[in-house]
């Protein structure tokens, strides 16, 4: 990067840190640290929550996915639009959760089930979350290392240090400093400021990509140059995609319904709004919030694919393949046990020369035509074959890192000075915002839902705040060590699925049915969460030990053919969307499939066990402060009538102002009318009558993925920049004037008379 790039990176970062430092003065109570005093408005919730939810690791995951499958698969994701719309407009789960007035998910579990379930759930939730988060620093630091073209190692006084480790240490330290200063207040303020600064940055990058690449002359020809069944444009020609396929889309839709609110990576935002209505409106604004950001993410991936595959950029692509293989090989083969093959691999990736030893390895692998010289695009496969002779697991890690870093390295080569700094600043913002939010969430769950319920004598506010800071710092230390030593073997989105499934595999029913079904019991909750977690953990163990231990054991006892028959027979009815093949490198069942199996078992267990053990329906009215349990914060509900029916379906209630109603209707008409009816159902009907040729799909995505989103983005960038700035000012005023309730520390106060009070009829 040039001097201009560093100026663009450093100045916004200093602005964010300065504002965050000033915001710590408002932290006085546990509620301030955990939920920003519960006084946040909708725009702060929306802008800050969006920044926190889209981390650098998520950006790398999106690039990884779009580089593989393009636009085609996402067309089928639109089938979930009505569900997402209804859930957003009605406040599905989020509204009721805010009505419980619980500060954390664990507090809700104790209200709904029992203290023992709160502790059990918190153990699994924190275990799942911390492990899931623990690769965030690794992917983020590695992305920056490759994007900035930093060396894998550096030396100080003869001592060798890891650049990757140093970058993780720096950014984790910054994140810990932000979180421990003021908890959710400083997190929300810094995330909001980062989001406001990023809006024009997104626009700059989108404008450059549109200027740099020709849609019809370069991008579309590259996307159309695909084998049958693996189209990047035609959603009717995707039957041979093996990972991000239609089953992947289906599981995502299923999970969005049954695991609503289950993931607590941004737990502080769930309770930060001043009331349930503001929480709901903040989520509703998210429909318009993304603006240029999502357009930028997808355009960069598509531009990188074009850069790496179009004939016009062949020389540049070869340079990227060579540089990337060299760096991944250096990183993977840093240990002494690779000394026997390192010189041969590095000779190949630097000069293209195949030594006799490499020739023997490549011939033995059976994947190369030794009568032709190797192309740079084959260097990674060659390096992987050599590494596999020493460690099959490390060979898989090399492949994973290569796929993850391909887009960042390609982008580095195609962006000019200035634009490179803009993207680097966005990357750092995304990395820090997600680190702070996740460390805060998982650290607070450990304190609030594991340690706090065991303590008979309540903490003083100072003791509880100090403990929260210590545990949060401990989460950062674990993430650093895990990221440094753990070998990720799957795609990022697949890793999210399987580690998240430790918790998400069984948590969904305990939350969704706990909020809506009065016959759900504690026994049913234990059964759902326990079964889902067991299946997910078993899946992780199989994936991590397959190449090194399980497959060699199958070979030793001559069981490979038997296992192959079992897995292939079990998946055959679901081909081509689920294909289980036994290979030496990877466990046959991918992470998304394990996740889906865990969810099905968990839902079934919750319903069956609850029906068996339910002796008396739970008093939902009391928990939600409704009916005879309503207080001054509860507003009367609009009754169901013929005139109010449609308004209630799209979520309009007694809390809506005229502006809120306009917003709700705009979201409904845009998401359902334009997004689902016109761009999804209309196209399906048209293709049923007359199938579109490939170039029609190119025109379609040009309009729906670029032209119209850019128009919306111009409006939303101005809208949210103004709204976010005004709402941030209001947040500071509310924090300065609010009354501090020091008893609001996450404990559940049980009253026997309340428990026995009958539900309103």
Image: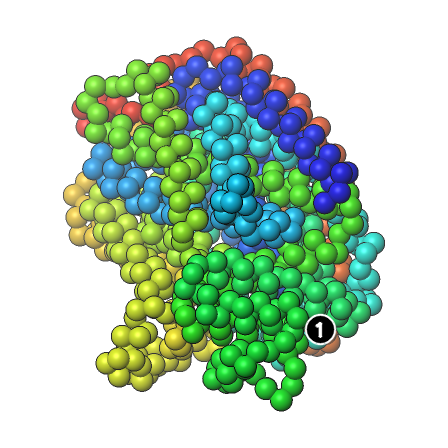
Count of labels in the image:
1
- Could you say where residue 111 lies in the image, as x and y percent from the top left? 28, 32
Q: Where 544 falls versus 725 (above or below)?
A: below
Q: Is residue 638 visible?
A: no
Residue occupying the point 34% across, 59% down? 540
Residue occupying the point 21% across, 25% down? 455
Q: In the figure, is residue 520 to the left or right of 276? A: left
Residue occupying the point 54% across, 72% down? 344
Q: Nearer the viewer, residue 28 or 574?
A: 28
Quadrant of residue 433 within the rendered picture: top right
Quadrant of residue 605 within the rendered picture: bottom left
Q: Nearer the viewer, residue 364 or 473?
A: 364
- Could you say where residue 119 lies in the image, as x and y percent from the top left? 25, 37
**Residue under pointer 1:** 224
Label 1 element class: helix
Q: Nearer the viewer, residue 421 or 37?
A: 421
Residue occupying the point 70% across, 68% down? 318
Q: In the figure, is residue 513 to the left or right of 688? A: left
Q: Quadrant of the C terminus?
A: top left
Quadrant of residue 595 within the rendered picture: bottom left
For mark 1, does the 10 Å Cα neighbourhood hold few (<14), some (14 to 19), or many (20 or more) residues?
some
- Could you say where residue 183 lies in the image, as x and y percent from the top left? 46, 26
Q: Is residue 477 visible?
A: yes
Q: In the figure, is residue 190 to the left or right of 529? A: right
State the residue lying farthest toward the front. 158
- Identify the colour scheme used: rainbow
Q: Quadrant of the N terminus?
A: top right
- Could you say where residue 665 lies in the image, as x and y percent from the top left? 64, 41
């Amino acid at each position: 990067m040039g001097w201009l790039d560093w100026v663009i990176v450093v100045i916004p970062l200093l602005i964010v840190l300065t504002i965050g430092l000033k915001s710590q003065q408002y932290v006085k109570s546990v509620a301030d640290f955990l939920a920003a005093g519960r006084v946040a408005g909708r725009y702060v919730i929306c802008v800050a929550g969006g920044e926190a939810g889209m981390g650098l690791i998520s950006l790398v995951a999106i690039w990884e996915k779009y580089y593989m499958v393009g636009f085609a698969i996402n067309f089928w994701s639109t089938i979930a639009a009505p569900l997402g719309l209804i859930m957003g407009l009605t406040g599905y789960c989020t509204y009721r959760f805010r009505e419980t007035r619980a500060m954390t998910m664990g507090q809700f579990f104790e209200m709904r089930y029992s203290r023992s379930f709160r502790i059990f759930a918190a153990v699994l939730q924190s275990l799942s979350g911390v492990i899931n988060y623990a690769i965030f620093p690794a992917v983020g630091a590695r992305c920056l290392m490759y994007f900035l073209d930093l060396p894998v190692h550096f030396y100080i006084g003869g001592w060798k240090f890891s650049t990757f480790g140093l970058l993780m240490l720096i950014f984790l330290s910054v994140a810990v400093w932000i979180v421990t200063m003021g908890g959710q207040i400083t997190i929300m303020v810094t995330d909001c400021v980062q989001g406001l600064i990023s809006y024009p940055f997104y626009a700059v990058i989108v404008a450059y990509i549109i200027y740099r690449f020709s849609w019809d002359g370069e991008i579309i020809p590259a996307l159309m140059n695909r084998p049958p069944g693996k189209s990047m444009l035609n959603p009717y020609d995707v039957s041979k995609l093996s990972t991000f396929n239609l089953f992947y889309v289906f599981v995502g839709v299923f999970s969005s319904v049954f695991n609503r609110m289950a993931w607590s990576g941004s737990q502080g935002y769930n309770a930060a709004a001043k009331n349930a209505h503001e929480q709901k409106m903040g989520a509703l604004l998210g429909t318009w919030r993304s603006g240029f950001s999502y357009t930028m993410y997808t355009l960069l991936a598509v531009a990188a694919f074009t850069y790496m595959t179009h004939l016009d950029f062949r020389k540049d692509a070869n340079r990227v393949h060579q540089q990337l293989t060299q760096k991944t090989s250096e990183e993977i083969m840093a240990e002494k046990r690779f000394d026997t093959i390192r010189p041969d691999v590095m000779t190949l990736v630097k000069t293209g020369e195949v030594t006799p030893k490499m020739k023997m390895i490549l011939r033995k692998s059976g994947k190369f035509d030794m009568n032709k010289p190797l192309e740079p695009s084959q260097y990674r496969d060659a390096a992987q074959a050599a590494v596999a002779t020493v460690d099959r697991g490390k060979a898989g890690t090399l492949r994973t890192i290569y796929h993850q870093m391909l887009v960042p390295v390609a982008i580095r080569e195609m962006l000019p000075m200035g634009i490179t700094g803009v993207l680097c600043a966005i990357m750092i913002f995304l990395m820090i915002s997600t680190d702070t939010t996740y460390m805060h969430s998982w650290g607070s769950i450990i304190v609030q839902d594991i340690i706090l319920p065991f303590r008979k004598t309540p903490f003083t506010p100072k003791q509880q705040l100090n403990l929260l800071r210590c545990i949060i710092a401990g989460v950062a230390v674990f993430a650093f060590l895990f990221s440094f030593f753990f070998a990720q073997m799957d795609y990022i989105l697949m890793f999210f699925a399987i580690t998240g499934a430790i918790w998400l595999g069984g948590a969904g029913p305990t939350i969704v049915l706990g909020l809506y079904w009065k016959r759900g019991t504690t026994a049913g909750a234990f059964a759902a969460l326990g079964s889902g977690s067991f299946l997910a953990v078993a899946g992780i163990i199989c994936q991590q030990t397959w190449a090194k231990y399980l497959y060699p054991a199958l070979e030793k006892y001559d069981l490979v053919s038997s296992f192959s028959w079992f897995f292939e027979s079990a998946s055959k009815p679901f081909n081509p969307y689920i294909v289980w093949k036994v290979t030496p490198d990877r466990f046959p069942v991918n992470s998304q499939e394990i996740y889906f199996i865990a969810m099905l078992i968990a839902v079934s267990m919750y319903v069956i066990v609850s029906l068996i053990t339910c002796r008396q329906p739970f008093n939902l009215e009391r928990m939600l402060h409704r009916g005879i349990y309503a207080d001054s914060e509860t507003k009367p509900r609009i009754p169901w009538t013929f005139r109010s029916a449609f308004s209630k379906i799209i979520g309009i209630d007694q809390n809506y102002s005229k502006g809120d109603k306009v917003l709700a209707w705009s979201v409904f008409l845009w998401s359902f009318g334009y997004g689902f009816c016109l761009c999804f159902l209309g196209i399906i009907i048209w293709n049923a009558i007359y199938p579109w040729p490939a170039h029609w799909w190119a025109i379609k995505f040009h309009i729906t993925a670029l032209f119209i989103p850019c128009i919306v983005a111009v409006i939303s960038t101005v809208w949210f920049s103004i709204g976010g700035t005004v709402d941030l000012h209001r947040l500071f005023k509310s924090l300065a004037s609010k009354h501090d309730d020091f008893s609001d520390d996450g404990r559940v106060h049980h009253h026997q008379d309340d428990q026995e009070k009958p539900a309103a009829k």
